[in-house]
Amino acid sequence: MRPGSLPAKTVLLTGATGFVGRQIHRALSENGHSVRVVLRTGTGGRLAAEADIIETEDLFAEEPAFWSKASAGVDAIIHAAWFATPGIYLHAPENLDCVRGSLALARGAASAGVGHVIGIGTCFEYALPSAHLSSDSPLGPTTLYATAKLALLQILQPFFAGTGTTFSWARLFYLYGEGEHPSRLAAYVRQQIDRGQVARLSSGTQLRDFLDVRAAGAMVAQVVDTGQPGAINICSGRAVTVRQLAERVADAMGRRDLLEFGAAEPRPGDPTVVVGVCNLVSAGN
């Protein structure tokens, strides 16, 4: 038994080598759970912690029978894998492959009798902009990525309701931190300052719900212990401007002078405000 008399579990994790998945894996291990990962052949060296490894050339091409076998003896599944190549993932047709593969995973998990499945969604499933996004706020995705995520949720909720499997949907907001792609805000600012170059930014007035990816990973891992069903906002619940985050990063490096606000245009369709209301329950509650 772990601290607080919560039993250790065996958790199957996909996407364990990704930006968020690595942090989920780390948190699960720190919480005393046994982790089994399904990942692309030859990528096990990028794992953040120990795990039992199942390799596949393409997990989204696998059939339900593969997932039923992979899920044998598993208490919970966290499905963090998805096509996420920066710059193209929002409208990429690979999102359709991810939906297809995720449905196969769900069928395999149900046939194996897995008690809890946790999917990973996005704040972009909501109708934006909004400064008060609760888990039941109006939905209105505008990209193929967010539409595919929401479609998967809307299929799996009634599917798992008929199987006895608890289904959770962890919606991620704006994440930053270890392992983020260089094109993301905080990483871009650090990179420019490291080079002694000016970071050219928009005016920075957009309000965002920023959260360190390590905290996000711990929050998703916590759902394994709480068993909280339904949509869960993985967010800070605090509004911070893009400018404030950039200044925070620059101040930590002692080079706020290298920030140039108003030098870049906002991204087309960028919402003015995206702030969530965190509804994650604590373990033991």
Image (cartoon, rainbow, N blue to C red):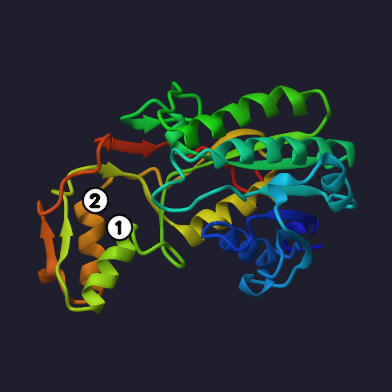
Residue 107 position by quadrant: top right
Q: Position of residue 206 (x, y in %)?
A: 22, 42
Seen from the viewer's position, the closer of residues 132 and 58 is 58
Label 2, secondary structure: give it: helix
Label 1, secondary structure: give it: helix
Q: Indicate the quadrant containing the C terminus: top left, top right, bottom left or bottom right.
A: top right
The first of marks 1 and 2 along the sequence is: 1
Residue with the mark numbered 1 = 185
Seen from the viewer's position, the closer of residues 11 and 197 is 197
The disc placed on residue 12 is none
Amino acid type assigned to the residue bearing label 2 in the image: Val
Q: Position of residue 196 (x, y in %)?
A: 17, 78
The residue at 34%/57% (across/down) is: 184
- How crowded pointer 1 is (Cα within 10 Å; few <14, some 14-19, many 20+) is rated as some
| In the displayed structure image, the side of residue 172 where residue 207 appears, left or right | left
The residue at 58%/63% (across/down) is: 22
The residue at 29%/64% (across/down) is: 188
Q: CA distance from mark 1 to mark 2?
A: 8 Å
Residue 103 position by quadrant: top right
Residue 209 position by quadrant: top left
Where is 235 relative to 183, above or below?
A: above
Single out the mark in the foreground, 1 or 2. Answer: 1
The disc placed on residue 242 is 2
Q: Position of residue 14 (x, y in %)?
A: 68, 54
**Mark 1 touches mark 2? (CB < 8 Å):** yes
| In the displayed structure image, the side of residue 268 where residue 39 appears, left or right | right
Seen from the viewer's position, the closer of residues 89 and 194 is 89
- How crowded pointer 2 is (Cα within 10 Å; few <14, some 14-19, many 20+) is rated as many
Amino acid type assigned to the residue bearing label 1 in the image: Leu
| In the displayed structure image, the side of residue 88 where residue 200 appears, left or right | left
